[in-house]
């Protein structure tokens, strides 16, 4: 394909291309203006984002403080081995309490028998003195 016919065509129609480009370029610029933010809108959005970021940073600091407090409290709690040892000690105490309660129950029965015997002896003495 030769370039000569194309150049001839452009010479004949250059004025139309110039007019169309002068009409289309502003339309394209108006369209693009609506697609992008203006400097004022950008400043407003930046200020709003800065405020939101500072709010989020404050919230994160609050969460950090609570987390540090929670870690400190959790550091003072017993670990698994300590809980196991405490469970064993509680089990030993429960067994000792059961043994002691059985012994106390036996002593209670014995005290009841002694009390009954003493009561009978006292009644007997009172009858003898009363005769």
Image (tube, rainbow, N blue to C red):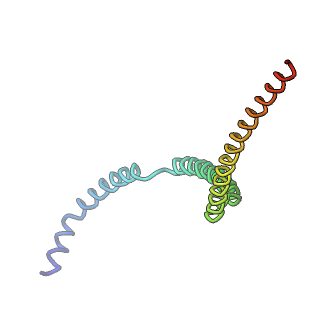
Comparing 75 with 69, the one in front is: 75
Which x, y percent locates residue 115? 76, 34
Q: Is residue 24 left or right of residue 127?
A: left
Identify whether 80 is placed above or below 102. below
- Going by the image, does 29 lie left or right of 105? left
User: Along the horizontal axis of the image, is 121 left or right of 1?
Assistant: right
Q: Is residue 80 above or below residue 101?
A: below
Looking at the image, the residue that sits furthest to the right is: 129
Give the total number of marks visible in the rendering: 0
x and y percentages locating residue 80 in the rendered image: 61, 63
Residue drawn at x 66%, y 50% as measured from the top left: 62
The image shows residue 65 at horizontal and vertical percentages of 68, 54
Residue 39 visible to an observer of this rendering: yes
| The quarter of the displayed image where residue 24 is located | bottom left
Quadrant placement of the N terminus: bottom left
In the depicted view, which residue is nearer to us: 31 or 74?
74
Kindly identify the residue that appears in the image at 64 percent across and 52 percent down.
Answer: 94
Q: Is residue 58 visible?
A: no
Which of the pair 34/88 is nearer the observer? 88
Picture layout, residue 83 above or below residue 41: below
Q: Where is residue 108, by image quadrant?
A: top right
Q: Which residue is rendered at x = 17% and y = 74% of the image?
A: 6
Q: Residue furthest top?
A: 131
């Amino acid at each position: 394909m030769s370039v000569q016919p194309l150049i001839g065509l452009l010479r004949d129609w250059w004025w139309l291309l110039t007019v169309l480009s002068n009409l289309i370029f502003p339309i394209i610029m108006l369209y693009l203006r609506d697609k992008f933010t203006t400097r004022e809108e950008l400043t407003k959005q930046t200020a709003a984002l800065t405020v939101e970021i500072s709010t989020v940073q404050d919230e994160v600091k609050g969460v950090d403080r609570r987390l540090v407090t929670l870690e400190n409290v959790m550091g003072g709690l017993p670990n698994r081995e300590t809980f196991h040892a405490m469970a064993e000690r509680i089990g030993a105490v429960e067994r000792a309490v059961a043994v002691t309660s059985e012994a106390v129950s036996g002593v209670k029965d014995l005290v009841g028998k002694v009390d009954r015997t003493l009561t009978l002896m006292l009644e007997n003495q009172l009858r003898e003195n009363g005769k």
